[in-house]
Image (cartoon, helix red, strand yellow):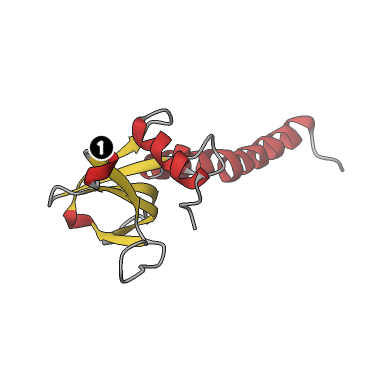
């Protein structure tokens, strides 16, 4: 005896709903809940290079590639730059300096505690800071 067409249709409909729930609805729900916690545009595979400006509560600012981990107590800034007063013979007021040229020769990756951060902003690709960092890299400033 074969099953009636209506019984076969009901069985297929139940299977389709289970498959749909497991492979479409559930991942979409999880993605909708989790996605606000991630900035997909910050991934290096999406678009051009992204630099961040990290402003600290003590008034200093650092620029570089920001690496954040959800729930971590610190962030890491790679290839960090900062401004310092320029030497008098240059005619400039400030100079952009790559971190790592200090006497203690710090390794790449500056860890900053989250409670010391006042703000984090994206640096525009055509901003003066981005152009100065690109010029420094072309002159051999990047290690």
Kindly give the residue lying farthest to the front in the view shown.
89
Left or right of residue 143: residue 78? left
From the top left corner, tell me how far across and down residue 136 is, in percent.
44, 45
Out of 39 and 12, give the one closest to the viewer.
39
Please identify the residue farthest to the top as the structure is shown: 126
Residue 67 visible in rendering: no
Task: Give 34 or 116, whichever is nearer the viewer.
Answer: 116
- Residue 126 percent across, percent down from the top left: 42, 28
Question: Residue, x 54% and y 37% (percent of image)?
Answer: 46
Classify residue 73 by image quadrant. bottom left
Q: Residue 34: give x, y in percent of width and height.
A: 41, 45
- Which residue is painted at 64% across and 39% down in the image? 14
Give the structural element (helix, strand or loop) at label 1. loop
Coordinates of residue 20 in the picture (x, y in percent): 61, 38
Residue positioned 33% across, 50% down in the render: 97
**Residue corresponding to mark 1:** 92
């Amino acid at each position: 005896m074969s099953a009636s067409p209506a019984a076969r249709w009901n069985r297929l409909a139940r299977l389709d709903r289970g498959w749909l729930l497991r492979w479409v609805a559930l991942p979409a729900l999880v993605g909708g809940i989790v996605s606000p916690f991630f900035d997909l545009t910050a991934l290096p595979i999406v678009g051009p290079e992204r630099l961040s400006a990290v402003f600290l509560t003590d008034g200093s600012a650092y620029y570089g590639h920001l690496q954040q981990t959800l729930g971590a107590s610190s962030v890491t800034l790679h290839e960090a730059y900062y401004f310092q007063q320029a030497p008098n013979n240059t005619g400039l007021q400030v100079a952009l300096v790559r971190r790592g040229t200090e006497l203690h020769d710090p390794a790449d990756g500056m860890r900053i505690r989250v409670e010391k951060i006042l703000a984090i902003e994206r640096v525009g690709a055509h901003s003066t800071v981005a152009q100065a960092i690109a010029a420094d890299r072309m002159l051999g400033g990047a290690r």
